[in-house]
Image (tube, rainbow, N blue to C red):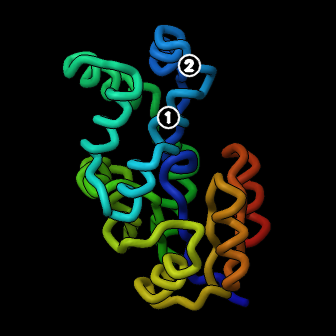
Amino acid sequence: MQIKALIFDFGGVLMRTVDQTPRRHWEISYGLPKLGLAKLVFDNPVAMQATIGDAQSSDVWDYVGLELGLSNSELIDLESDFWKGDKINIELMDYIGTHGVTYRTCILSNAWPNARNLFNSITELKLFEEIIVSAEVGIAKPDSRIFLHACDQIGVDASNIVFVDDMVENVNAAIDIGMHGILFENTEQTLTDLHKIVG
């Protein structure tokens, strides 16, 4: 089938945590294992509610603060440090920019209610014609309904879409509805896989 659209996950694919040092500082200070802070932030029950719009981002950070026993000022510092090591994946963005003339381009992100403000502030994301945020539609990956929603939003059948995500369960869910799925392991591998399918 002819490829007509490219859909990408945001966190872990288009935005990568390239420096763990700021997070590691907090992990060491509070006795968390390596990568334990990200697990605490993203995998807690309030974060899961926020991902489908049933809680606010501030609720997630309040939960983290209570878990670690942080003061308000410490929590503000932790939230700031948590994102400091994140960088846009310029190499992948260059590929998308080049192919955006030929293919519809979309972001499909499991993200909290205020994510739209972040996306709007990132200049590189202006090239995407559609950004779908799980909190805004009340459904999160790997639920098949959010993939079908993405198809409807861009007006392209699943069989004509390539989907890229760093979570295997999300890629498998996309494949299950007929999309071409690519599991992001690193940028070089992902670009190679895209070239094989898209050219």
In the rendered image, residue 12, in percent from the top left (x then y), is placed at 56, 46
Tell me, for residue 89, which label it has, or none.
none
Q: Residue at x 52, y 52 (%)?
A: 94
Q: Which mark is residue 32?
A: 2
Q: Residue at x 54, y 22 (%)?
A: 20
Name the residue that disc number 1 marks: 40
Residue 115 in view, yes or no = yes
Is 124 left, or right, of 99 in this rendering? left
Q: Amino acid at mark 2?
A: Leu
SS for tag 2?
Answer: loop
Going from the N terminus, do you reach mark 2 or mark 1 first?
2
Q: Residue 9 placed where, x, y %?
A: 53, 58
Q: Secondary structure at mark 1?
A: helix
| Residue, far left | 72
Foreground residue, 90 or 63?
63
Residue at 54%, 13% in the rendered image: 31
Give the residue type at disc 1: Leu
- Residue 156 in the image: state x and y as whole percent: 52, 89
Image side of residue 13 versus residue 106, left or right: right
Label 1: how many Cα within 10 Å (few below 14, some 14–19, many 20+): some
Q: Quadrant of the N terminus?
A: bottom right
The answer to whether the residues at label 2 and label 1 have Cβ atoms under 8 Å apart is yes
